[in-house]
Amino acid sequence: MAWITGLAAVPSQWTCPGSEKSKEILENASKSHRMQFVEFSNEEKTSSLHGIIYNGEKNTFPWLFNDSLPERLPRCILYLNPNGATISAWFSSKSQQISEDLYKIGGVPRDLYEIGEIPIIMYDYEGTGLNREPLSWNKFYFPTCESVVADGETATQYAASRCDLVDIVGSSLGGGVATVALDRYLQKFPDHKQRFRLFNHDSFSTTAKVVLPIFPTIANWLAWAVGGLLDAESAMSSLVRREIPITVLYNQHDHVIPKGAQMAEWINHLEDKKNIYLIQEKLDHGHSDLTMWMRMGLSCAKDPFSLAKDPKKIRTNEYCRQFDEPSTPT
């Protein structure tokens, strides 16, 4: 039953290009972007995951960068996709097209790089995009809620092996996966907690509440029974107790994650929120968009997202003062 619920939870397995087309798109993108193709796994995962480390356009500050990356990075972003996207989607939009086969990066990864100017590790969930091999008689694989969390934990372990400090950013499904995966990783490596920050973007408290928000207990039990429960709220409670720096970005008018299922709502009921920073978009925007207001909030945070900016100068900006007391969910 778990793979059936996975069909709904991870539609990118059947709506996005498979491995061959994804590789073609990304190889074309590498002509105008600095990116390193990577493969990683851990002792608990029998198969490897394929992804990239993105480090900006090739024509950006050429005197500061070359196409190669050192084996050890001082800081990086690990980005986890929403359920309807794979890496190739960020490089193949017609609106980002430069020429017949060249594209600019788009969407949330573009915004994150513009804010932080640090390398971004991206990967596709197993069974999607770069990690969806052509089906054959002896190879049938369908992602589930559990498998995408296992992938997230593998990616978190890889990011920790390459970077001293890791900002984990997840949008929609990726936000839930990032939250649970980071909690599982820190259960095994509790001494690593100083190396991580979590950015939960337009995500849910549990997958079940997205479907049945008015009966959360029944929804969670039913989802657990069929293998479709991704419980991000329990993991978030654990991360709060560990005092992990957490930023929650959310759209007040989210048309995908309904009221009663949004992570931001659930966090508002926690008594201890001192390590949580809330950034609320009040205008009506699309789900999983990193809006201008959210980008301003990331730049204005007391622990700024961007290393390229002086925190003292940032906090003196007039517009940043309105983020000193972030709004609570309504």
Image (tube, rainbow, N blue to C red):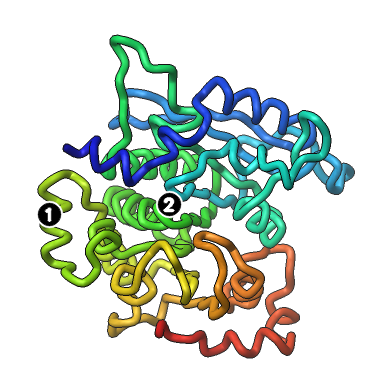
Tell me the residue at 61%/39% (across/down). 53
Q: Earlier in the sequence, mark 2 or mark 1?
A: 2
Tell me the residue at 28%/44% (across/down). 145
Q: Nearer the viewer, mark 2 or mark 1?
A: 1
- Choose between 97 and 242: the one closer to the eye: 97
Going by the numbered disc 2, the residue's amino acid type is Gly
Going by the numbered disc 1, the residue's amino acid type is Leu
Query: Dot 2: what SS?
Result: helix
Q: Tell me residue 312's x, y (percent).
A: 71, 81
Q: Tell me residue 149's x, y (percent).
A: 32, 45
Q: Tell me the crowding category of disc 2: few under 14, some 14 to 19, or many 20 or more residues within 10 angstroms, Cα based.
A: many
Tell me the residue at 48%/86% (across/down). 327
Give residue 62's quadrant in the image: top right
Q: Tell me residue 78's x, y (percent).
A: 52, 49
Give residue 52's quadrant in the image: top right
Q: Which residue is mark 1?
A: 222
Specify the label residue 259 is tagged with: none
Specify the label residue 174 is tagged with: 2
Residue 177 located left or right of residue 309: left
